Image: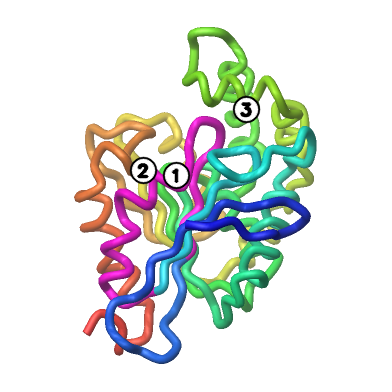
Amino acid sequence: MNSVRANGIAVHVAQLPPAGDRPAPPTAVMIHGMAGDTLASWYFTLAKPVADAGLRVVTYDLRGHGRTQRPRTGYTLDDFVDDLDALLVALDVTGPVHLLGNSFGGTIAFGYAIRRPEAVATITTIESAPPTQAWFLRIAYRLSQAAQPGRRLAAARDFVGTTSVARELPASRLPGDARIAAIDCPVLCVYGGHSRVGELAPEVRRLLPHAEVVVVPGERHSLLVDRPETVREVVLPWLLRHTPQEVGR
């Protein structure tokens, strides 16, 4: 693990090298969720299985989270996409990347694909949605609840209380349906059957009819951490189907 300068801030990064000796393995970038989450949610669940399958894995703490620098302001969707774009340049990541996002991390992945479609091989999201108005209304509500004592993790309360995220993120410039619908890379969206985020699945299907949607019965928003084996069984075969055939051998 180390710190990389990207988009004017110090970003905490953890990488796993791919298994095997392929000269130019594809890269999987794993993006965690908002407020209270860190790269650990990916690092201790899917990062090693994906690296063992032959992909270079990059995980990082979002701005204001974990060990990444916490500026007071700069928390729109564009800021988070800018960070990802700059981080990939700083890490010398070339070729289309596989983006995996948990909760708001998936929204960052969609935002990056809208901006840089040629740079994205696939998008995999867990309990997430593209940057639609309906999703951002939910995000605004969750941020407002995180600020209340006793309602969320202390880390989430601290993040919301010491930054402008609760004001800036809900006011983000959204791309609109047409630009979301223009995403043409393979997309996999996984939801917990008892999670309210899954209520957005019909909207995802409308905007991205080519997306594969999987619902895991009985699970909630913490699906990735609670059921990593199940998530791996869904995600890894799908991911390998959309990578060069040499990977995973």
Is residue 46 one of those drawn in magenta?
yes
* Label 3 environment density (alpha carbons within 10 Å; few <14, some 14–19, many ≥20): many
Q: Residue at x 61, y 77 (%)?
A: 92
Magenta-colored span: 29-55
Element marked by disc 2: strand
Q: Is residue 200 above or below residue 188?
A: above
Labels 2 and 3: the sequence-earlier one? 3
Classify mark 2: residues with Cα within 10 Å, few (<14), some (14-19) or many (20+): many
As drawn, the label of residue 159 is 3
Tag 1's secondary structure? helix
Q: Viewer-proximal residue, 91 or 75? A: 91
Towards the viewer: 88 or 131: 88
Residue 210 visible in the displayed image: no
Depth-wise, is mark 1 or mark 3 nearer the camera?
3
- The residue carrying mark 2 is 191
**Quadrant housing residue 82:** bottom right
Please indicate whether residue 183 sits to the left or right of residue 173 in the image. Answer: left
Dot 1: few (<14), some (14–19), or many (≥20) neighbours within 10 Å?
Answer: many
Which corner quadrant of the image does residue 94 belong to? bottom right
Say which mark, if any, is on residue 116.
none
Closer to us: mark 1 or mark 2? 2
For badge 2, the amino acid type reads: Tyr
Answer with the quarter of the image where residue 149 lies: top right
Residue 145, x across and y down, in percent: 57, 16
Residue type, label 1: Ala
Q: Earlier in the sequence, mark 1 or mark 2?
A: 2
Task: Name which residue lies at 37% across and 54% down.
Answer: 213
Q: Secondary structure at mark 3?
A: helix
Q: Position of residue 28 (x, y in %)?
A: 44, 68
* Residue at the disc numbered 1: 201
Q: Is residue 165 left or right of residue 44?
A: right
